[in-house]
Amino acid sequence: MHATPQRRQNLERLDNEPFDLVVIGGGITGAGVALDAASRGLSVALIERNDFASGTSSKSTKLIHGGLRYLKNLEISLVREVGQERAVVHKLAPHLVRPEKMLLPLIEGGSLGKLSTSMALWVYDFLADVEGDDKRVMLTKEETLEMEPLLREDILKGGGFYAEYRTDDARLTLENVKTAVKHGAVAVNYVEATGFVYDEEKKISAVQCRDRFEGRDFEISCDHVISSAGPWVDDLRKIDHSMNNKRLFLSKGVHIVVARERLPLAHACYFDVADGRMLFAIPRLRCTYIGTTDTPYKGDPNAVPVYVEDVEYLLRATNEIFPTVNLKMEDVESSWAGVRPLIFEEGKEAGEMSRKDEIFESESGLLSIAGGKLTGYRKMAERVVDRLGKQLHTEGEDLGRNSTRNIVLTGGPFRNFAEVLSYEKEIAEQLAAASLAPDRAPYLVANYGRQTPEIIDLARSRPEETDVARLAAAEAKWCIEHESALYPIDWVERRSGRLYFDMPSILPVLDDVLGVFARTYGYTEKDREQERQRVLDAIQWVSEFGHEKKEGDVQVD
C-alpha cells in the first residue's frame, strides 16, 4: 500500500518544518486545541497514533449535554460551563449538534422526587441560560404517558421535559480537525508519538514519531507540546519522566444499539435504574441506543470489550422502565465501549468522580490535559492554550485571545436548525434528480452538512450497479480525499457511523467501498482481503459478546 500525495506532503512538512506547537492526540480535545491554537496564529501540527476520534471521542453517549446528574455532586461550575457550551457548539454546527428534548420520568423509589426534580431542572436551565420553549416543563403522570406510552405505568409519578443536544462525536471531532486545517494546522492520523528530544535546558525541542501507515520514523521540531491523548495521557507523562501523584482513573462506559422498531421511543429518555444510577435511551434515525455503564477499567484502552454482563445490565434496566418491549440479547445489533479518562480521587467510586478537566505541566514544558466532558471540549482547549500563552509570555511573546466560539465548523454554515431541516429537503430533491435514494438525505446532512452535494456529484459518475453502492462508494472516496480516511474501517466506523447505527447497510456495499480504497492506496489482493477481514472482525466485535473473566477464573484452552 502507498500513501496519497496529500499525506506524503503533510508528512514532509512535519519532518522538515519547525512548529510552534505539536498537539498529540486527535480526539475531540486535541482537535479543539489545534483549532484554538491555529486560529490564534500559531503554527500547529496535530498527530494521532490511530485514526482521528478512534478513542474515547467516538465512544461517548453522543450528547452535548449539561450533565444534570452532576448537580447531585454540587459541581455547579461544571454544570454552568457545559450547560452554556451546548448553545455555543449548536450554533457552530447545527447539522451535527441537534436539539434533543429529553424526558425524565419520575418513578416511585427513584432518585428524584417531583419537587427536587422541578428545582434541579430549574437550576439547570438557570445555569445554562436556557430561554423560551427550551425551558423545563413539569408533567403529570397522564401527560408523561401521553408523551411516552411505553413507560411503566404502575410506578410512574410524573415527569420532567427539558432541552439537550445530540451529536455524532466522531463527526464533531473530524469537523474540528478540518476547520483547524483551514486555519493552517497540519493534521495527520496514524502517526504515533514515541518519544521526546530535549535541549540543553531539558525543555522539549522535538517529538519523535512513527508513521504507522508506511513504517517510517521521523522527528517534528517544535517549541511547545500539548498532550491531549485521553486515556494515554499518563503513558506520555511516563515517557517524559513527569508522572507524579496525580494520575488518571479509567471508567468504562458501554452502549448498546437496537432497531428503532424494537424500542420505538417518541423522545429521548433519561431514567432511573434500581442500583441508583441513571441511563439514557436515545432514538437516532433507524435505531435507538441505550447507555451507559460506569465501571472501573484496567485493560487495554485500545480495545475495550463489551461483555454479556454489560448488555444484560442495560437490557434489564430498559425492560424495567419499558416493560412491554421485552428486549432480548438477540435484539442488540451493535454496541460500543470506551473509557473516560477521569482524574483519580481517593475513596470515590467511578460514577462519583468529577468530570472536571485538569492540566498538568511538567518541567520539560509538556502540557497535558485530561478529564472533562465532550460538551466542554472548546473550553478545555481554551484553558490549555491560555496556559501555553503563559509559557510564551515568559519567552517574551504574547498570544491572542480565544475566538473559537465564532468559528463555524466545516459542513456549515447554517443559521439555525430549521435551516438544516429545510436543507435536508433540498438534498432529497438532489438525490432523486441523480437517481439516488432520497431517503438518505437526513443521514447525509447529519454527517456532512453542506458538503453533501460534493458526494452526490461524485456518485453521479460512478459505475457501481446499484444506487446504494454508487452513493456509498462516492461517500468513501470523498472521505479519503477530504477527511484522511486511510482504511475502510475508518469510513465504516467513524466517517459514516454505519458500524453502530446502520449495521445492515455495510455488507451490501462493502465490495464497492473496498474497491475505492484499493484503487486509491494500491492494494494487492492480499491487502484487500485483509481490509475486508478487519471490517468483518469489527462487526463481530460490536455484535457478539463474551463473558467477563472474574478474578480466580481458570482459563481452559
Image (cartoon, helix red, strand yellow):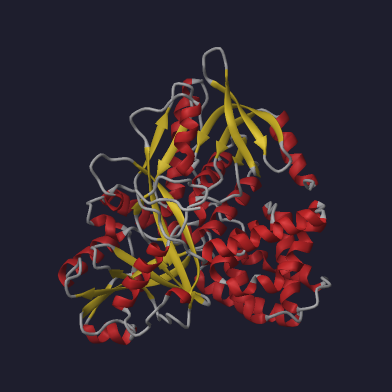
**Residue 399 horizontal/vertical position (percent):** 51, 32
Q: Which residue occupies the foreground of this view, 330 or 416?
A: 330
Residue 314 appears at what percent x and percent y?
A: 36, 68
In the image, 376 versus 512, the foreground residue is 512
Q: Residue 117's image quarter?
A: bottom left
Between residues 223 and 145, which one lies in front from this camera angle? 145
Residue at figure coordinates x 71%, y 76% from the top left: 468
Residue 343 figure quarter: top left
Question: Quick check: 261 above or below 134?
Answer: below
Tell me what residue is drawn at x 36 percent, y 59 percent.
293
Image coords of residue 445 (percent x, y): 60, 70
Q: Is residue 139 left or right of residue 402?
A: left
- Give the answer, above or below, for where 358 lies relative to 451: above
Q: Tell whether 34 sits left or right of 261.
A: right
Residue 46, percent across and down? 60, 40
Query: Which residue sits at x=59%, y=59%?
Result: 494
Q: Of all residues shown, which one is farthest toward the front?
A: 557
Q: Is residue 191 above or below residue 287?
A: above
Residue at 35% over, 71% down: 134
Residue 412 visible? The answer is no
